[in-house]
Image (cartoon, helix red, strand yellow):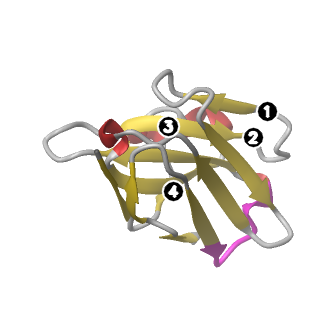
Amino acid sequence: QLQLVESGGGLVEAGGSLRLSCAASGRSIRVYGMGWFRQAPGKERQFVAAITWSGASTYYGNSVEGRFTISRDNAKNTVYLQMNSLRPEDTAVYYCAAGVSTDQVFTANTVDYWGQGTQVTVSS
């Protein structure tokens, strides 16, 4: 089993930055596609970003393209999400996700493993 634990969430003013981390244990993330999702109150879980096992390719949701950057350090078994130019509409619980295939971390219902989430709140 792969366990995922997110950290780095918090309260930030609009225009600010946060860096989320997702620390994995139980298995190496080296063979997994990894991603980030978010869920705001009353809304469905939304794809944010994904990265292939090697880190060679990254993918982003339209609303975060150009502002967020996903990266991974397989040696540290950790995935990151750098969030810049934050907006109030980015407020949500952010979840780390893993899939045997990177394709699985584009859609919430195909993800193999989830973290417990970390709250990000952006004030206006």
Q: Earlier in the sequence, mark 2 or mark 4?
A: 2
Q: What stretch is highlighted in magenta?
A: 24-30
Query: In the drawing, does residue 77 fall left or right of residue 87?
Result: right
The answer to whether residue 101 is seen in the rendering is no
Give the amino acid at mark 3. Answer: Val
For disc 1, the marked residue is: 57
Residue closest to the far bottom: 26
Picture disc at residue 48: 3
Picture disc at residue 52: 2
3D distance between C-alphas at marks 2 and 4: 14 Å
For disc 4, the marked residue is: 96
73 or 102: which is nearer to us? Answer: 73
Q: Are marks 2 and 3 in contact (CB under 8 Å)?
A: no
Q: Which of marks 1 and 4 is nearer the N terminus?
A: 1
Query: In the drawing, does residue 70 fall left or right of residue 37?
Result: right
Give the amino acid at mark 1. Answer: Ser
